[in-house]
Amino acid sequence: MQTLTVQLDERSYPIFIGPQLLDQAAELLPELAQRQLLIVTNHTVGDLYLVRLQQQFSAARVLVHYIGDGEQFKSLDSYAAIMSDLIGAGFNRDCAVLALGGGVVGDIAGFVAATYQRGVDFYQIPTTLLAQVDSSVGGKTAVNHPGGKNLIGAFYQPRAVLIDCDVLNSLAPRDFYCGLAEVVKYGIIHDADFFGWLEQQQQALLARDSATLQYAIASSCRIKADIVAADEREQDVRALLNLGHTFGHAIEAANDYNQWRHGEAVAAGTVIASRLAVAMQLLSASDFRRIVALLQALQLPVKAPAMPWETWLQYMQRDKKVKAGKLRFVLPTAIGKSKLLTDCDEELVAAAIADAS
Ligand SMILES: NC(=O)c1ccc[n+]([C@@H]2O[C@H](COP(=O)([O-])OP(=O)(O)OC[C@H]3O[C@@H](n4cnc5c(N)ncnc54)[C@H](O)[C@@H]3O)[C@@H](O)[C@H]2O)c1
Ligand SMILES: O=C(O)C(=O)C[C@@H](O)[C@H](O)[C@H](O)COP(=O)(O)O
Ligand SMILES: [Zn+2]
């Protein structure tokens, strides 16, 4: 097992990474033994792994809440239903919320933990590759709104993240590939050597080789932990983790959160951002080709859906990076380097979208 730490002074927390960690939860999280525990999950995950987790906490008072399976259930309705369960069960401020699932479960459970009685302890037990490499770390919690992605939420750090790499074995291929979109992102924005390693390891990643996956997970978590420690509330460098998301979130929201997976939308959005960077003479054509080739090799979409410019603009203007009414885009400037830019020429943005659609 590996242990990383997200350094946030008195709010620092461990990320445990390894095989069979579900069966070590009581040993790794002893503070939960006698507590009121709410486990948020869905039936896809719960039917596979809930019993193993519950067996770890036989002396605790465990309440389980199932949300629907899919992005469309990361909603205020799901949030309200979870809150009603907590209130109905009489859980106190010393309870804890555990997220057993992917990023959808983790984001909504985190927002519940952030707001129930103004904040209770929160633990992430991510079960998708995307959640293990990204959403379980860093404290962004949220629910979606028809008007846009993650528009209602809070920064709220977990007390610990428990990553059992073995649970990825049951993940459907489409959902597995989605996590690779966020892994590639770290290579593009921050680490050229990691990007090169990903290019070399394409087949091992697609074959889900356990050592290769564990290295990719640990590397991704390490990069994200360092960025979050430096800029927890996204006033500066943390925005770089949003590469592809201005476009990706528009794709998800414009398609009712039920046609494009987040990872797929981020992959397509990363291609648009890279095209824009080339048009602005920030990124070389050869680096652009490497980015597209790796995303394609990892079974991710590199074309965006055709949508009217007005639709793109409607959702991009609700992006949380907007400042002083201006759109801001994270653009790659080389493999391993990126920057946050304002005042991108609207015609170039529209052309980059059109070229990628
Ligand atoms: N908070 C953050 O920093 C952050 C970062 C990245 C993404 N996100 C959010 O995460 C969400 C996407 O997360 P996701 O890609 O994990 O999607 P998801 O949570 O919808 O999970 C994908 C599918 O895999 C199933 N599943 C989960 N674990 C499984 C397992 N071990 N075996 C079999 N099936 C399993 C789920 O039931 C679901 O059907 C989006 O809402 C996105 O906005 C948040
Ligand atoms: O942790 C971050 O910061 C990220 O941007 C990670 C993203 O992969 C993730 O999708 C995040 O939820 C997007 O943040 P948002 O602020 O655009 O909602
Ligand atoms: Zn993302």
Image: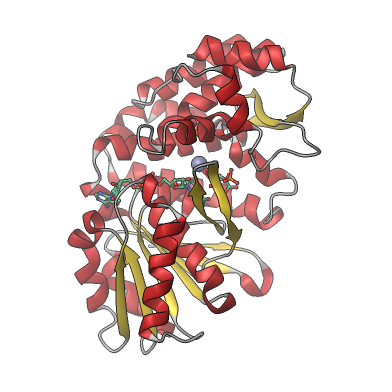
Quadrant of residue 139 within the rendered picture = bottom right
The picture places residue 114, in percent across and down from the top left corner, at 55, 69
The residue that appears at 55% across and 63% down in the rendered structure is 5
Q: Is residue 117 left or right of residue 8?
A: left
The picture places residue 240, in percent across and down from the top left corner, at 65, 39
Quadrant of residue 9 within the rendered picture = bottom right
The residue that appears at 65% across and 13% down in the rendered structure is 278
Looking at the image, residue 199 lies above or below residue 285: below
Where, quadrant-wise, is the N terminus in this rendering? bottom left
Looking at the image, residue 289 lies above or below residue 49: above
Looking at the image, residue 161 lies above or below residue 204: below
Residue 151 visible in the snapshot: yes
The residue that appears at 42% across and 52% down in the rendered structure is 74
**In front here: 198 or 170?**
170
Looking at the image, residue 280 lies above or below residue 153: above
The residue that appears at 58% across and 33% down in the rendered structure is 315
Q: Is residue 134 left or right of residue 63?
A: right
